[in-house]
Image (cartoon, helix red, strand yellow):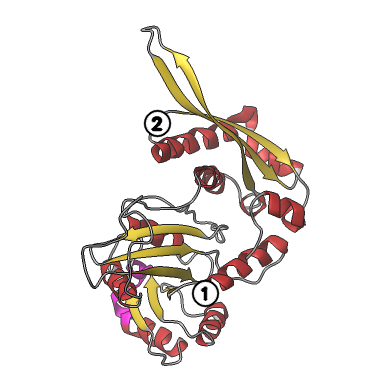
Amino acid sequence: MFSTEPTSKDFRSGFVALIGRPNVGKSTLVNRFVGEKVAITSPVAQTTRNRLRAILTTADSQLVLLDTPGIHKPHHLLGERLVKSARSAIGEVDVVLLIFESCHPPGKGDAFIVNLLEKQKIPVVVALNKWDLVLPSDFKSIEKDYKSLINNNSWKIHSCSAKNGDGCLNLIKSLSKNLPKGQYLYPPEMVSDQPQRILISELIREQVLLHTKEEIPHSVAVNIEKIEEIKSQKKSGLDVIRTGVLATIFVERKSQKGILIGKGGSMLKTIGSEARIQIQALIEGPVYLELFVKVVPDWRRKPSRLSELGYKGY
């Protein structure tokens, strides 16, 4: 057991939900906060599917960060469950971090989320992310547009860049002030409470997002079939232990399977090689990774398949 007693009498701890449209940089911001990779990122919108919990512990506070799927208009059952997951997180936390993509003007999707949060009796802190992409000459007009969007609510607005870290420290301090006084919720050294199996499947899916064509990413899911220790012996007689991972990548059409495998298996080899490097960094040891690709037509619309793959909704 770990000690739940922090050294500071004014120590604060609680839950923070990161809310925003797809691709505003929620996962990148989570990784920036905790100082290491706990959430997958890619240029593809709607990358996040699970409500991942990351843990940031400072001298004065412990923030449990819920990286939620982007709120969007769903087009299938998977999309409906992802949006439901994000919306339900709002009622389960102590403060909401509302994230906007400041390099673009506010849109209807942003206004929808603001209206949703106005109905909740919960503190909100606003982050104008990707501030590094805004021209200095546009700073004032961008701030004015977003202040108008939040309808003059008393929500504190911060500009920041998840990419280079600018403004993130002030943002963390602002979030901490809105948390209740309390003890450690998790051991201070923890950065995520997600099972290893979930983190590994997400690292594999990340490489699919980064390396395949546009028609593939949203049709892909990864299931970890087996994780086991593999013992082999070097010529010196010493045992070498590797972590063996067997995973299945699900797609919806045969054409997608062909793209994923690639000519002579080249694409699947690239995905596997890059994913293995990420998994090795996660578990801090050598990994043997074996990938298979399986076609399951319309899996995103089938409740049983979604539940099997962990997309149960909340």
First in sequence: mark 2 vs mark 1: 1
Q: At 34% across and 54% down in the image, what residue appears? A: 187
Q: Indicate the secondary structure of the residue bearing disc 2.
A: loop
Tell which of 185 and 191 is nearer to you.
185
Residue 134 in magenta? yes
- On the rendered structure, is 103 left or right of 10? right
Q: Indicate the secondary structure of the residue bearing disc 1.
A: helix
In the image, residue 239 sits, relative to residue 198, either above or below, namely above
In the image, residue 4 sits, relative to residue 231, either above or below, namely below
- Residue 219 % position (x, y): 67, 51
Give the magenta-colored segment's residue range.
Answer: 130-139
Tell me which amino acid carries mark 2.
Gly
Residue 92 in magenta? no
**Tag shown at residue 90:** 1
Tag 2 residue? 285
Where on the picture, by quarter, is residue 144? bottom left
